[in-house]
Image: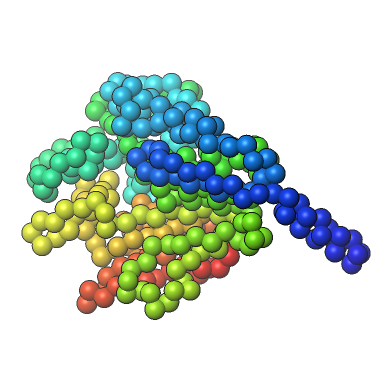
Amino acid sequence: MKGLFLAGCLLASLQMSAQQAITISGKAQGTYYMVKYLSEDTTSLQHEVESLFRQIDRSLSLYQPGSLINRFNEGEKVVMDAYMRPVIRKAQEVSRITGGLFDITVKPLVDLWGFGVVRHQKGRPTATDIRSTLQRVGYKNITIRSKYLLKKIPGVEIDCNGIAQGYTTDVIAQFLRARGIRNYLVDVGGELAALGHNDKNQPWTVGIERQQQMEAKPEKGWLRLTHRAVATSGNYQRFFDEGGTRFAHTINPLTGEAIHNNIIAVTVTAPDAMTADAYDNALILLGVEKGLDFIRQHPKLQLQALYIFKDADGVIREKYSDGFFEVQ
């Protein structure tokens, strides 16, 4: 038996050495993408990958005129395609589990605060405008009936930006698996999915954003992944300051308020990128302690998270769930 085990290890090693490390990269969906994988076939897959981006954009991009999501927002119903259907179903699932903290019908509020497709900096909306806009927000205001996505009340609009990029990452990963590739790292604008090992037969190693003050622990700035996905949501890129308060682009769909808590960023790992991407939104709204409690209370979701935040004295600190820095 020992000889068989050693022979199996040798065969696996020879198979790995026959594969070459391939990287393709470019721009898509308003950001970058990079795909690394191991394969004996060195034919470039870039054309097929970029075709997937275009197909998904025709379905879910608010920036593409005539896209399926824009047609839904402008009308009453649409026939969902193969890309919209899983995203809507996942969004509704996450909305139910989080009690509406994640909600793709938040688009009217995102627009009101100036963080939508047409961006503006007119400041904090009035309480009256927020209350009025909230009447068109709520995940229960859309429904799936057979192949259709329908609105229950007029004026409902959806924005899948909080989940679509993770979904795109998963679609590319699925494409690679369909081509027989079992060792890859897919990165779409910071939403990642990893499987297997790199060309050194080691887990894929990815850096996670840390603040300068946290660099005393550089060994914790890296994640090692063999079958896991990662997404990060932060309040340090899109925001505006008013009256001594910083309002970030993450909108609470229950209150209509742009987030203004002490969270700088939350990094989430999950079995797939769409799950990680969706839950990072809810976890940043929950805050550190409630967010970590949520993870402990929902073990079946298989979530891990790292929070970077400012304490009451303005000192940047971190907290993370058990197992976050283990090989995943």
At 38% from the left and 74% from the top, the residue drawn is 215
Q: Position of residue 214 (x, y in %)?
A: 36, 74
At 24% from the left and 28% from the top, the residue drawn is 155
At 43% from the left and 77% from the top, the residue drawn is 217
Is residue 153 found left or right of 275 in the rendered image? left
Q: Nearer the viewer, residue 192 or 24?
A: 24
Q: Position of residue 250 (x, y in %)?
A: 27, 50
Is residue 131 found left or right of 309 in the rendered image? left
- The answer to whether one can see residue 80 in this image is yes
Q: Position of residue 249 (x, y in %)?
A: 25, 49
Give the position of the C terminus as an image quadrant: bottom right
Q: Nearer the viewer, residue 61 or 297?
A: 61
- The answer to whether one can see residue 272 in this image is no
Q: Position of residue 111 (x, y in %)?
A: 21, 38
At 57% from the left and 59% from the top, the residue drawn is 204
Work out whether 60 lies above or below 283: above
Work out whether 63 lies above or below 268: above
Give the position of the N terminus as an image quadrant: bottom right
Q: Examine the image and state in which quarter residue 54 appears.
A: top left
Number of numbered discs: 0
| Coloring basis for residues | rainbow
Work out whether 287 lies above or below 182: below
Q: Examine the image and state in which quarter residue 176 appears.
A: top right
